[in-house]
Image (cartoon, rainbow, N blue to C red):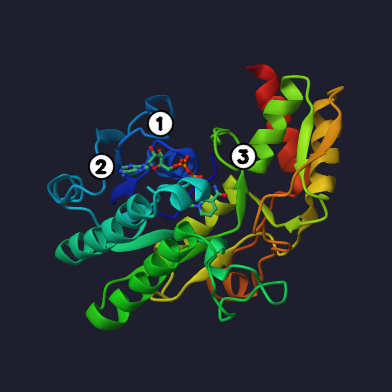
Amino acid sequence: MEETPISGRSVVITGGAGFIGSHIAEALAADNDVRILDDLSGGSREHVPAGAELITGDVRDPELLADAMDGADLVFHEAALVSVEESVANPRTSHRINADATVGLLEQAREEDARVVLASSAAIYGHPETVPVREGDPKDPTSPYGIDKLALDHYARRYHDLYGLETVPLRYFNVYGPRQNTEYSAVVSAFFRQAREGGPITVEGDGEQTRDFVHVSDVVRANLLAATTDRVGEAFNVGTGASVTVNELAETVVDVTGTDADIEHVEARPGDIRHSEASVSKAREVLGYEPRVSLEEGLRKLAETKGRR
Ligand code: NAD
């Protein structure tokens, strides 16, 4: 594990038993007092690193949130209803978890005077007019999930302007890496599962849609930079600044896993975004963020770890 400039702090990570949150916890657990609040609806106890405390419960519960955040000086807010499909099926649940609970968390952070780094999403942009997408570009989310993440992003920035709270929303693009849940629409982990099971690897539509895949270790570094930057109250894209087609992704997964699985095209997902790619110029200039893991390297590493299981 690389060194972090953060030590001796009281850190809370909501959703810290999940994919991204557990990697943030792993980076901080040795040198900080790390508390995780997670209801284990998507995450797992096994993802909680040694030295971190797990409080099992719901971010919608204000008393629990107050207990978990008691004495905190730094909060990473990763807990969410992460499935876009589920948000379409249950918009109220998405709103309660993704938007309303975020307001509760920001209120509690005011009590504690804690800095809050929040998981926003590329979903807030909807169908981008041009790529790479810059932070100031139009936002027209196409799902309740995207709408609620846009609310989170706005609230976070306005809590800085209105109440002086130190907040930094990070707009993640397509994050991948070890421990990612295969159950919702995370294409990298779905392709790995299909490759392992002998296929077919199913590409939706013509596969010429593009995505910016960013390795979770780069996302962790962006979070640590956001935790220490002077430029609070602003949002940053977190991607790589490059994109590949889903066809290229499928071919690389075949290559790195050595699977015999065929690649098959299935029906396109209605409303699927055609092109997505982050401009990371602002994160680079302001935070000093530099994505380090190329897609091929990240996928090769993933093939090695999955092969060991
Ligand atoms: P994940 O499902 O692995 O992690 C989310 C965690 O939140 C899980 O451990 C789950 O148990 C927990 N959780 C869900 N509802 C909760 C609740 N009501 N109370 C307490 N805990 C709850 O997903 P992830 O990919 O690690 O996502 C982390 C964050 O990043 C989320 O906010 C997600 O919306 C955002 N994000 C992820 C991506 C991506 O590509 N993975 C892209 C954009 C944004």
Which mark, residue 125?
none
Read off the residue under disc 3.
177
Read off the residue under disc 1.
49
Give the Cα separation between the discs numbered 1 and 2.
Answer: 20 Å
Q: Amino acid at mark 1?
A: Pro
**Image position of 306 with respect to 263: above or below:** above
Query: Which residue is more in the foreground, 111 or 204?
Result: 204
Q: Amino acid at mark 3?
A: Gly
Query: Which residue is more in the foreground, 259 or 5?
Result: 259
Residues under numbered marks 1 and 2 in contact, where contact means CB atoms less than 8 Å apart:
no
Viewer-nearest of discs 3 and 1: 3
Viewer-nearest of discs 1 and 2: 2
**Image position of 51 with respect to 166: above or below:** above
Q: Is residue 87 left or right of residue 65?
A: right
Residues under numbered marks 3 and 2 in contact, where contact means CB atoms less than 8 Å apart:
no
Which mark, residue 58?
2
